[in-house]
Image: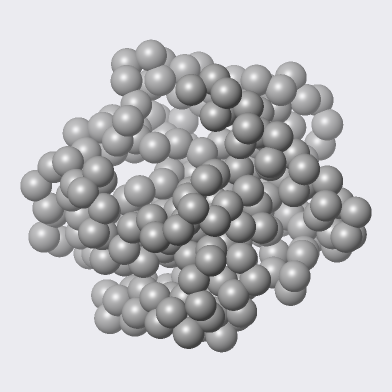
């Protein structure tokens, strides 16, 4: 199983020291990730460093170097406890909100990106949580790809293409099947041990750039497969809650 890298919580005031450390490892091994950029960060937990004033210009530099951008919510503020259609989390910026409100948030996020010349049709929901209204709002605002779900390669469901994340990293590393999944990272909260594990992963030869997803055929997901994914996601959420 090949592995692509996804970095969440990219903001002008993130922990830049850790971001640069993460980037240096990716550059060393020639990996280009997906980054989830928050259009208008209002989440104080993500505000760690001084704001980089040329933030969007820097993001454009990364894109020109082969990095891929997803719109990571709007303000990254959790407003409900609705786990949504992919219930591995227990909070949401979007799920449970009215369609008109979700449409407004996604439109404003898109407007900020366009004003700063950032083009993407990939959406990354904070805490992986989205519902039917989110999908309607995304479709109305020109998004076609969602980075979430479980699978062994791209699949189509509810009119969207999903690029899946790993159910469990340790199991993925042992999986010898052909396919591609995503490992999710939050550089802001990584420690030395996490960076050492990341470099070991990059050394393994299993990691490819996120753009490789576009080379895979897209599987049409069945209702039964969607139902099984919902069960797996729910079980994962419960296990995480029990461990904590």
Q: Position of residue 97 (x, y in %)?
A: 49, 71
In this picture, residue 164 sits left or right of residue 117 = right
Q: Is residue 35 left or right of residue 61?
A: right
The reply to whether residue 110 is in sight is no
Q: In x, y percent, where is residue 135?
A: 61, 73
- Tell me the quarter of the picture where residue 185 sits: top left
Residue 13 visible, this angle: yes
Q: Tell me where residue 229 appears, x and y as whole percent.
A: 77, 47
Image point (63%, 27%), residue name:
239
Looking at the image, which is closer to me, 90 or 200? Answer: 90
The residue located at (83%, 52%) in the rendering is 227
Q: Quadrant of residue 207?
A: top right
Q: Which residue does the image show at 15% across and 61% down from the upper left?
A: 54
- Is the residue 179 above or below the residue 120 in the image? above
Q: Quadrant of the N terminus?
A: top right
Q: Position of residue 199 (x, y in %)?
A: 45, 21
135 or 122, which lies in front? Answer: 135
Q: Along the line of sight, which residue is nearer the eye, 147 or 57?
A: 147
């Amino acid at each position: 199983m090949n592995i692509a890298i996804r970095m969440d919580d990219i903001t002008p005031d993130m922990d830049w020291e850790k971001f640069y450390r993460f980037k240096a490892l990716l550059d060393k091994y020639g990996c280009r990730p997906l980054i989830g950029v928050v259009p208008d960060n209002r989440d104080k937990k993500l505000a760690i460093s001084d704001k980089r004033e040329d933030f969007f210009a820097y993001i454009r530099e990364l894109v020109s170097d082969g990095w891929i951008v997803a719109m990571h919510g709007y303000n990254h503020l959790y407003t409900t406890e609705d786990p949504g259609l992919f219930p591995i989390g227990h909070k949401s910026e979007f799920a449970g909100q009215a369609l008109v409100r979700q449409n407004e948030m996604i439109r404003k996020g898109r407007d900020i990106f366009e004003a700063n010349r950032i083009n993407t049709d990939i959406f990354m929901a904070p805490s992986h949580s989205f519902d039917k209204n989110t999908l309607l709002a995304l479709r109305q605002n020109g998004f076609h790809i969602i980075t979430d779900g479980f699978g062994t390669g791209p699949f189509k469901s509810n009119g969207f293409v999903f690029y899946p994340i790993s159910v469990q990293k340790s199991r993925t590393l042992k999986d010898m099947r052909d396919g591609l999944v995503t490992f999710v990272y939050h550089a802001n909260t990584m420690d030395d041990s996490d960076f050492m594990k990341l470099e070991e992963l990059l050394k393994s030869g299993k990691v490819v750039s996120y753009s490789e997803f576009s080379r895979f055929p897209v599987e049409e997901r069945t209702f039964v497969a969607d139902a099984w994914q919902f069960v797996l996601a729910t079980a994962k959420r419960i296990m995480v809650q029990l461990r904590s």
